[in-house]
Every structure is written in C-alpha cells, then in structure tokens.
Amino acid sequence: MNTSHLTDQQIQLFVFQQGNEFEPWATHMATCKECQLKATLYRSVLEEVANLEKPVFNIDLASQVISQLEPIKPSIDFSRTLVGFIVLVLVSWLGSIVYWTSHELASLFTRLSSMATYLILLTSSSLLIFLVISLYQEFLDKMKRLTLS
Ligand SMILES: [Zn+2]
C-alpha cells in the first residue's frame, strides 16, 4: 500500500476526471481520511461552480446590434434586367416582323407543299426535343454536383 498522500493535482484529477487510469489512487483514496477530506472539498467546489447562477446582462444586446445594422438597400438584379430587356427586344422584333409580313404569312402555309410543312414541323420538333433533353441533362448534372458538395 502506498503510504504517501496524493498531491493536490492528483486529487483534483481524481475528482474531476473519473476514470480507470486513476485506479492506484482510488485504493489510497478509499483508506486515507486526509485525502478523502480534500476530495470532498474539491467536490463541493465543483458543485458550487455548477450551481452558480448564470450571469444575466441588464442590457438588451439584440436591440443594440439591430440598431447598428444598416438597412438593406433594394438592389437591381442585373441578370434579370438583362433577360427582361432581351425578351422585350425579341418580342418587339417578332411583333414587327409579323405586323409587316402579315399579308404574306397568311398564305405561307397554303403555298408550301404538305411535304415541306411536315419537314419544317419535324425539324422544329426534333430541335425542341433535343433542347429539352439537353436542359434536363444539365439540370441533373448540376443537382448531382450540388448534392456531392
Ligand atoms: Zn492520503
């Protein structure tokens, strides 16, 4: 049996960090009244610290922080403005073309042969299907990259 008393640091470790690595000290602590008294003192200090009331500030920190924040200025989204402008230009361009050629557009499909009409419809629908599939593949690729990162 170890007859020398534990140091204050060993007793603090024994009290604050319960574990198997303190087994040699536990046998001494079980028999030594002086070390048990010191351990009881440290346990009571630990309990007192744990039972301390949380400090409450008498200032309203949230309102002070919020008062220092600058209000958000409404910003113009440049990309949306650009897309809107492009769509407006395209619609007005198409409208003016339809307006100036309306007398010829009415007779366009009547003058074309049915074969030419079917070829135009087949080409445009194939192009549309290809674009939709391409957009969907791009969407899936971006979603995969988002979920991986
Ligand atoms: Zn002791």
Image (cartoon, rainbow, N blue to C red):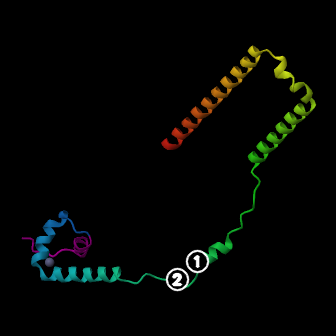
Q: Is residue 118 above or below residue 88?
A: above
Q: Would residue 140 be found to the left or right of residue 118 on screen?
A: left
Rendering coords of residue 47 (x, y %): 30, 81
Q: Secondary structure at mark 1?
A: helix
At 63% from the left and 77% from the top, the residue drawn is 64
Label 1, residues with CA under 10 Å away: few <14, some 14-19, many ≥20: few
Q: Is residue 56 visible in the rendered structure shown here?
A: yes
Q: CA distance from mark 1 to mark 2?
A: 8 Å
Q: State if disc 2 and disc 1 touch (CB < 8 Å).
A: yes
Residue 7 shown in magenta: yes
> In this picture, is 114 found above or below 103?
above
Q: Position of residue 116 (x, y in %)?
A: 76, 15
Q: Which residues are magenta?
A: 1-16
Q: Which image quarter is the N terminus in?
A: bottom left
Q: Residue at x 79, y 40 (%)?
A: 87
Q: Which mark is residue 81?
A: none
User: Could you say which is closer to the camera, residue 2 or residue 55?
Assistant: 55
Label 2 sits on residue: 57
For this orientation, the residue located farthest to the front is 110
Q: Amino acid at mark 2?
A: Phe
From the image, tell me which residue sits under label 1. 61
At x 18%, y 83%, the residue is: 37
Nearer to us in this view, 47 or 134:
134
Indicate which quadrant contains ligand 1: bottom left
Q: Label 1 amino acid?
A: Leu
**Label 2: element kind:** loop
Task: Please identify the quarter of the rendering in which residue 68 is found.
Answer: bottom right
